[in-house]
Amino acid sequence: MNSFLAHIDRPKVEGGLSVADVYIYDAISSSRWDDGVSAKEFAREINALDVDELRVFVNSPGGDAWEGLAIMNALRRHKAFVTATVDALAASAASVIVMGANRVVMNSSAELMIHDPWTFAEGNAGDLEKTVEALNKLADSYATAYANRAGGTVEGWREVMRAETWFSAEEAVIAGLADEWVDAVAAAASAQAFDLSAFKYKGRADAPAPKKGLLASEPEGTSISIEEEHLMSELSDGIRQRLGIADSVVDDAEILAALDERLAGEQASSKPVIPEGMRLVEDGVLDQMRADAAKGREAFAIMEAKRRDEIVAKAVAEGRITPASKERMRALLDSDEESTLALIESLVPNTVPVDEVGIGEESEPKSAADKAYEAAWGPRAEKEA
């Protein structure tokens, strides 16, 4: 009977985080009569692990394609940070399993292989057509998993799969299927422990170098090998280091733009740099501009003084303020015109006498009796109120 034949180490604490190690060192199988790792038992076992990090070590020739997809999704769904390390071989269904990890590591001399899934079928033409359709959908699911991690198109990865492509540890990283390769101590696992006769090639040494051009819509004849891509990557890294460009800048166009900018800066280093929005002005022109500005300020000050004098004069004429308060009100206008204008407007007109008092003519003519009295006795005395 089938069982989950992967070893799980007891969870431990490292660096303040809880960690569990899981080993998939067998074929992937759903048959109850075959040994191997089943998706059902695998998912049940890892779901019981309440840890911060799950480290999955893989050495598997693959097996049941549907089981591989299920295990990949079980890893992707787990709440822990998942690191999948290929110790020796991740072929066929095992290659898609590691795509479910947050980080994929290739150990020294490890290999990864991707190909189109295959099956045995029987029946009439209709039955076989359905089988072909199902296989293509399954293969597209695998290609989607590779594209999600490495980029490229689903059809591009289908081409790589149809060719049965083998990747060394370094090639898998350059292709984007893995994040790093490490020169770790050789694991006890070995790809030679498995029967690889079902595959077109017996391993990376027996297979041609993967073609990067298969992963992109490049014109035919322009594809380059992973080895050539690595050499160009080293060249780009060297240029980036010499220019002091951040490691996050990986696009060749950005690197070339930075190189052009550096070269242009060196050629123009003897020329004055004028900040944007500024212009050079000849000394004589600048002096004239300053003189004109001074005259303008002086003329404006004269006009402002005249305008404020008129405001005070009008306030006196309207009986809002006394002539004696003109100077004080004028000073207030200079210090705070807005508030002073509001004050003047709030004063009621004609509250202050405008005409002089005591020098006007009498308002009524004297009677004959008054004139006779004044002739005999002099002017009448004013009665006090």
Image (cartoon, grey):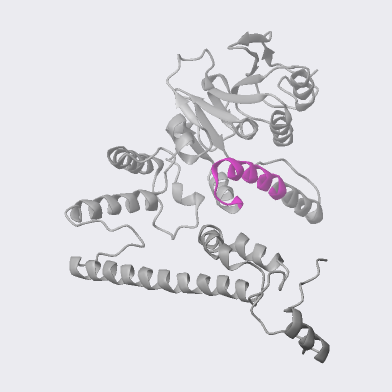
Horizontal side of 278 relative to 95 (left or right) equals: left
Work out which residue is located at the far left of the displayed protein and give it: 270
The question of residue 380 being in magenta is answered with no
- Residue 328 percent across, percent down from the top left: 54, 59
Which residue: 48% across, 29% down?
Answer: 180
- Residue 366 percent across, percent down from the top left: 78, 88
Q: Which residues are magenta?
A: 136-154
Residue 202, compared with residue 175, is above or below; it is above
Horizontal side of 7 relative to 175 (left or right) equals: right
Which residue: 71% across, 44% down?
Answer: 138
Q: Would residue 364 be seen by someone viewing this image from the given angle?
A: no
Image quarter in which the N terminus is found: top right
What kind of secondary structure does the magenta stretch mostly adopt?
A: helix
Q: Nearer the viewer, residue 204 or 129?
A: 204
Residue 313, compared with residue 169, is above or below; it is below
Horizontal side of 193 relative to 299 (left or right) equals: right
- Residue 128 percent across, percent down from the top left: 76, 51
Horizontal side of 182 relative to 235 (left or right) equals: right
Which residue: 67% across, 19% down?
Answer: 52
- Residue 210 percent across, percent down from the top left: 45, 42
Q: Nearer the viewer, residue 366 or 260?
A: 366
Q: Nearer the viewer, residue 12 or 330?
A: 330
The question of residue 149 being in magenta is answered with yes
Residue 65, compared with residue 49, is above or below; it is below
Image quarter in which the C terminus is found: bottom right
